[in-house]
Image: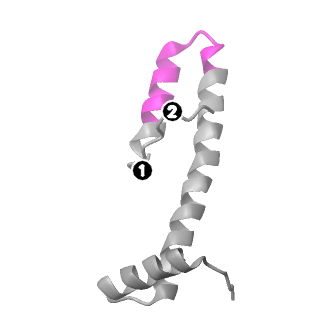
Amino acid sequence: MLGIRLNPDLEADLTALARRTHRTKSDVAREAVREYVDRHSLDAEYRRQVALVHEAQRGSDMDWLEAMAADLMADEPDYDWGDRKP
């Protein structure tokens, strides 16, 4: 169980969204928290993958590096990493 305090504007936005989508505020908030946690988990996984690629680049087997990068990207969700640095 989690209770959070929202400022009045954010709570009004949440209420309006819940009504428009015919869901409860809890359902909308739960989905938002899940997406946030998933996103930040992906950030950690992305940093791990980048570290592996950088480590591989220090070697001489570029074919292996390209194959590994292609394999990693094959399962990558549609996520805009923007200008993030690892």
Helix, strand or loop status at disc 1? loop
Q: Which residue is mark 1?
A: 77
Up-down relation of residue 30 to residue 57 (above or below): below
Q: Is residue 62 visible?
A: yes
- Quick one: label 1, few (<14), some, or many (20+) residues within 10 Å? few
**Dots 2 and 1: beta carbons under 8 Å?**
no
Image quadrant for the N terminus?
bottom right
Type of amino acid under label 1: Pro
Q: Look at 56% across and 62% down and name the residue there.
A: 36
Give the number of the disc on residue 83.
2
Magenta span dominant secondary structure: helix
Up-down relation of residue 52 to residue 62 (above or below): below
Residue 31: x, y in percent?
A: 48, 74
Residue 17: x, y in percent?
A: 38, 79
Q: Quadrant of residue 73?
A: top left
Residue in the foreground of this view, choosing between 81 and 13? 13
Helix, strand or loop status at disc 2? loop
Type of amino acid under label 2: Asp
Q: Look at 60% across and 63% down and name the residue there.
A: 37
Q: Is residue 21 visible?
A: no
